[in-house]
Image (cartoon, rainbow, N blue to C red):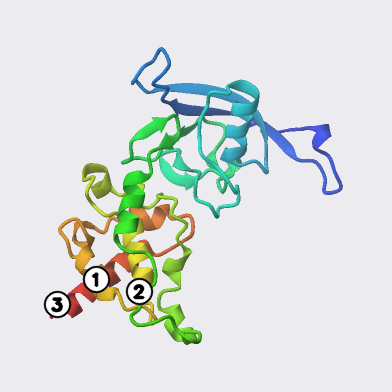
Amino acid sequence: MTATLDKSAQGSTGEIPSFEVTLKVRRYLPESEHGDEAYWDEYTLTMYGTDRVLDALHKIKWDHDGSLTFRRSCAHGICGSDAMRINGRNRLACKTLLKDLNPSKPITVEPIKGLPVVKDLVVDMEPFFASYREIMPFLITSGNQPSKERIQSAEQRERFDDTTKCILCAACTSSCPVFWTDGQYFGPAAIVNAHRFIFDSRDEGAAQRLEILNDKEGVWRCRTTFNCSEACPRGIEVTKAIQEVKQAIIRRAF
């Protein structure tokens, strides 16, 4: 990679190096001449050391090919809408710096696996959210509405703190080989969000959720390959959470 300096990028903090990078994007345009066949398009761009993959996709769409379709919203790693496979790994495009991907070689960008592709990098998220809804991702309590705050200690909160970080990007679920081959499997994200409530001291729906996840397509389909933990952009220990849910089911059964 040969870096050059763009004088227009100069400022009080100095010059920002620019470089040439090629993005190889997997396209799927069912209304085009390609029909239902996916294909690859390549775009060579001039980018900067501070740019992320999302910046490159914006440049393609705004300056080269307006038909390129992808999801994005906050651009700060919070909304989770721009999860995609970048160089064969699930990542958020807004958090992945181009310079960290060896831009001297083409960077491949394609939709996440295991979910139906709607167009280009956009997949149908409904199967993913159907599993999420099934584990009842909300606080379940009995009786009337409380007259005061439900107090929780720091230790009780810490018990499930890790799994509250999920942003529902589907990076973990769509990195799972079981999910790729079995469309009925709940998937890591649904189990992570069940964990968040199962171990919440204020919740009374743990037994219901554990019964749901004890199903043949629940936690027992996990093969502990750690793909999910590696894919999570929030650093959640996904595999650990799944194992803790398995242990909770065993304790309840015996």
Residue 127 percent coordinates (x, y): 31, 46
Which amino acid, by three-letter code, is at mark 2?
Answer: Ile
Tell me the quadrant of the picture where the N terminus can be found: top right
Query: How many numbered markers are drawn?
Result: 3
Closer to us: mark 1 or mark 3?
Answer: 1
Pointer 1: what residue?
Answer: 208
- Please identify the quarter of the rendering in which residue 141 is found: bottom left
Give me the C-alpha separation between circle 1 and circle 2. 10 Å
Residue 79 percent coordinates (x, y): 53, 52
Closer to us: mark 2 or mark 3?
Answer: 2
- Find out whether the residues at labels 1 and 3 contact each other: C-beta distance under 8 Å: no
N-term mark: 2 or 3: 2
Q: Which mark is residue 176?
A: none
Pointer 2: what residue?
Answer: 140
Tell me: 43 left or right of 86: right
Residue 73 percent coordinates (x, y): 57, 45
Pointer 3: what residue?
Answer: 253
- Please identify the quarter of the rendering in which residue 212 is found: bottom left
